[in-house]
Image (cartoon, grey):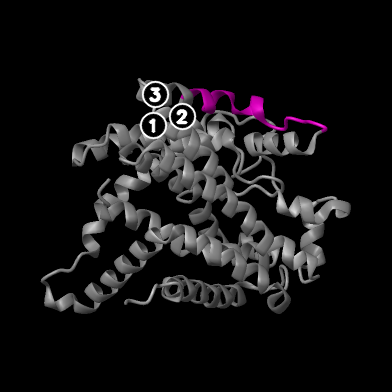
Amino acid sequence: MKRLVYLDMCRGFTVLFIPIIHCVMLYSKIEVHHTWFGNILGFIAEWPGGQLFMLMMGIWVAKSSKHYSDHFSRAALLFAAGYFLNILKYVLPAALGILPEAFIADTGFNEDRLLLELYMIGDILQFSAISLIIIATIKSLKGSLIIALVLLVAVICFSPMFWDLQSDLLVIQHLFDLIGGHPNRVFFPVFPWMVFVLAGFVLGLVWEESSRWMTTIFFIGVALFVKGYFIKDAPNAFGFYRTGAGGTCMHLGFVLMWVPFWRLITPFFEPSSNRISSLIKKIASLLAMTFTFCSKNITSIYFIQWIVVAWLFPVIGYRTLGVWQSLAIGIIVTAIVFTITYLFPYFFACPKK
């Protein structure tokens, strides 16, 4: 699929805030989460956040000409990367005694097997791997569009049936957690998060580059959002990470509105011939470059920022910062993460003969 600028801009906008969002989650006092600053970051994280990334994964797979084995290989790498990241951001700091005790207490894990449970935390990388295999498999089947639509509706309606499944076997229980999830064990479970990948896959199969098509998608999003607002969520839903039919429809509706919105505003970031607004042009051009960089390096940024955030615990502490301290630390961490991400390829570049 040819890269579409507005999709990169749309996704890159959210990626830009990933480091500062996680800084506030872990470094800031709880009351900061409810300030203007926390509310803005909360909105970015919970609405045009992970759901949007998964929607775009579905679009990418639908449009991709790659073979099933290529998707499977990438899924295997993502799955391994998820657990390797757990080692770097949780297990090693805990083993070295630099993971704050208050943080460990808040996880609610069994201290007798703390390192194992930290290692087995399921996050968006594990979910991305599982969903990539599922969606690539669906693509390989005849009638993939209908299959994806049926599964999309089924996941919205029946996700609660797969929540909180229990087993006495550790490995089976971990699989159940990856399917049904429950923070702090798994943050992005297959049910209901598979909805967004399936929706993206459906969109990718019927994709048209026209204003009329985008308008249609926007109003489908409006309809889903309104419908979801009036559906009562399941009693065992768990906020952002595990939504019932109502919450899932609202989140899906929002991202379906968000993509056309960025298609509409992206031209305003393009260079203009108007000399009077030269400063605005430069700022817009810089933002466009930044968003595009973020979108193209989303996996690297996500991976690196977690390592930086986790290993700065001894310096910054756990939930100790106020609003302005959080903002300052968030900007510094973001700068560190982006610098490492930008320079990383040069460290491993092969010298030319």
User: Could you tell me which quadrant the C terminus lies in?
Assistant: bottom left
Residue bearing mark 2: 227
Find residue 186 and report its image quarter: top right
Residue bearing mark 3: 141
Residue 40 rendering spot, x and y as whole percentages = 51, 60
**Badge 3 vs badge 2, beta-carbon distance below 8 Å:** no
State yes or no: residue 303 in magenta.
no
Find residue 246 and report its image quarter: top right
Which one is in front in this view, the residue at disc 3 or the one at disc 2?
Answer: 3
The magenta span reads 153-168
> Disc 2 on helix, strand or loop?
helix
Residue at image position (34%, 41%) is 66
Amino acid identity at mark 3: Leu
Q: Is residue 298 left or right of residue 281?
A: right
Amino acid identity at mark 1: Ala
| Residue found at the far left of this picture | 273
> Disc 1 on helix, strand or loop?
helix
Q: Is residue 82 left or right of residue 143?
A: right
Residue bearing mark 1: 223
Residue 340 rendering spot, x and y as whole percentages = 49, 74
Can you say whether 308 is above or below 146 in the image?
Answer: below
Q: Is residue 250 visible?
A: no
- Looking at the image, is mark 1 or mark 3 earlier in the sequence? 3
